[in-house]
Image (cartoon, rainbow, N blue to C red):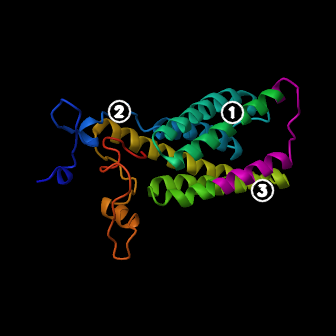
C-alpha cells in the first residue's frame, strides 16, 4: 500500500532518513468542556416568571400594585437566569434556544425595570391602554412564532411551549392596545398553559440529564428522520460534509 493510500506523506532532509508525516487525525488533539442542557435552567426560569405574571393577568390573585412585588423576581429569575441560559445555549450550538432564551430573558429584565421605575415614581404605568407595551408584545409574538416554526425540527415539546407563548403574546398585545380586560384574562390563561408546558419540558430535560436516557417523552424526531431531513440527495442519502472527516467528534449539537 502506497503512502498516498495510507494518508501519510514522507519528507526528505539532507543526511536524514525518510520518515512519514502523521496524518491530521493522528496529530490533532481535542479538549472538550462538558456542558449541561442550558434550557433546563432557561425553561424553569421562564416557567416560574410566566406562571406568576400570567396568573396575575388571569385575575387569580393580586391588586393593582402586585406588579411592584413581582418585578424583582421577574427581572432576576425570569430575566437574568434565562438570559444566561441563552448565552450558554450559544455554546451548545442551539440556535433556537439562543434566540428564545436571549430574547425573553432580555424582556423580563426590561419588564422588571419598568415596574421598578413605576415603584420609584419615575414613571407612571397606565392602568388601561398601554400601546407602547402592546407593540412590544406584538414584536415578541412575531419572533416567538418564528422560533415555533424552527422548533418543529427539534421536538414537539418545545414547539408547544413556543406556540402557546406566541399566542399568549398576541393576546397580551391586544389587551395593552385596546385596554380590554377580556383579552387580559385570555392572555393570562394562554401564558399559564405555556408556563406549564415549559415546566414539563424542563423537567424532561433534567431527568434525561440525570438518568442518561429519555424518561419523559418530548416528541423528538428519530435519528432516521433527522438523517432523512438532512439529506441532500433526491434518494434520501446523506452525503459527507466537507471538513473534518468525522465532523466534530465528542461535540454534541443542541440539547
Q: Which residue is mark 2?
A: 32
- Where residue 41 appears, as percent x and y from the top left, is 49, 35
* Contact flag, marks 2 and 1 (Cβ < 8 Å): no
The answer to whether residue 223 is visible is yes
- Say which of marks 2 and 3 sits in front: 2
Residue 235: percent from left, percent from top: 34, 76
Instruction: Name the spot of residue 79 as percent of width and height, x first.
Output: 63, 34
Depth check: give the residue in front, 219 or 188.
219
Q: Is residue 36 above or below residue 172?
A: above
Q: Which residue is mark 1?
A: 109
Report the residue that reaches farthest toward the left: 1
Residue lying farthest front? 14
How far is mark 2 from mark 1, CA to CA?
32 Å
Q: Quadrant of the N terminus?
A: bottom left
On the image, numbered disc 3 is attached to which residue? 174
Q: Which residues are magenta?
A: 118-143
**Residue located 26% across and 42% down the image:** 25
Q: How far, Cα to Cα, is label 1 from label 3?
A: 22 Å
Local crowd size for mark 1, using a 10 Å CA cut-off: few (<14), some (14–19), many (≥20): many
Q: Is residue 173 left or right of residue 194?
A: right
Amino acid at each position: 500500500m502506497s503512502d498516498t493510500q495510507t494518508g501519510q506523506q514522507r519528507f526528505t532532509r539532507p543526511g536524514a532518513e525518510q520518515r512519514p508525516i502523521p496524518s491530521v487525525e493522528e496529530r490533532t488533539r481535542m479538549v472538550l468542556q462538558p456542558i449541561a442542557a442550558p434550557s433546563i435552567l432557561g425553561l424553569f426560569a421562564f416557567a416560574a416568571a410566566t406562571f406568576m405574571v400570567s396568573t396575575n393577568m388571569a385575575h387569580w390573585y393580586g391588586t393593582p400594585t402586585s406588579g411592584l412585588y413581582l418585578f424583582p423576581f421577574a427581572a432576576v429569575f425570569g430575566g437574568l437566569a434565562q438570559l444566561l441560559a441563552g448565552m450558554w445555549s450559544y455554546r451548545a450550538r442551539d440556535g433556537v434556544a439562543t434566540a428564545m432564551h436571549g430574547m425573553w430573558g432580555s424582556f423580563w429584565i426590561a419588564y422588571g425595570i419598568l415596574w421598578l421605575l413605576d415603584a420609584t415614581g419615575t414613571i407612571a404605568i397606565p392602568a388601561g391602554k398601554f400601546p407602547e407595551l402592546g407593540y412590544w408584545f406584538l414584536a415578541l409574538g412575531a419572533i416567538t412564532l418564528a422560533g415555533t416554526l424552527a422548533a418543529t425540527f427539534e421536538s414537539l415539546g418545545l414547539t408547544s411551549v413556543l406556540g402557546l407563548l406566541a399566542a399568549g403574546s398576541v393576546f397580551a398585545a391586544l389587551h395593552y392596545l385596546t385596554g380590554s380586560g377580556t383579552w387580559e384574562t385570555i392572555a393570562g390563561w394562554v401564558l399559564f398553559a405555556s408556563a406549564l408546558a415549559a415546566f414539563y419540558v424542563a423537567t424532561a430535560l433534567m431527568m434525561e440529564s440525570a438518568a442518561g436516557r429519555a424518561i419523559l417523552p418530548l416528541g423528538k424526531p428519530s435519528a432516521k428522520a433527522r438523517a432523512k431531513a438532512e439529506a441532500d440527495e433526491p434518494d434520501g442519502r446523506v452525503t459527507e460534509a466537507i471538513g473534518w472527516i468525522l465532523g466534530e467528534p465528542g461535540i454534541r449539537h443542541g440539547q
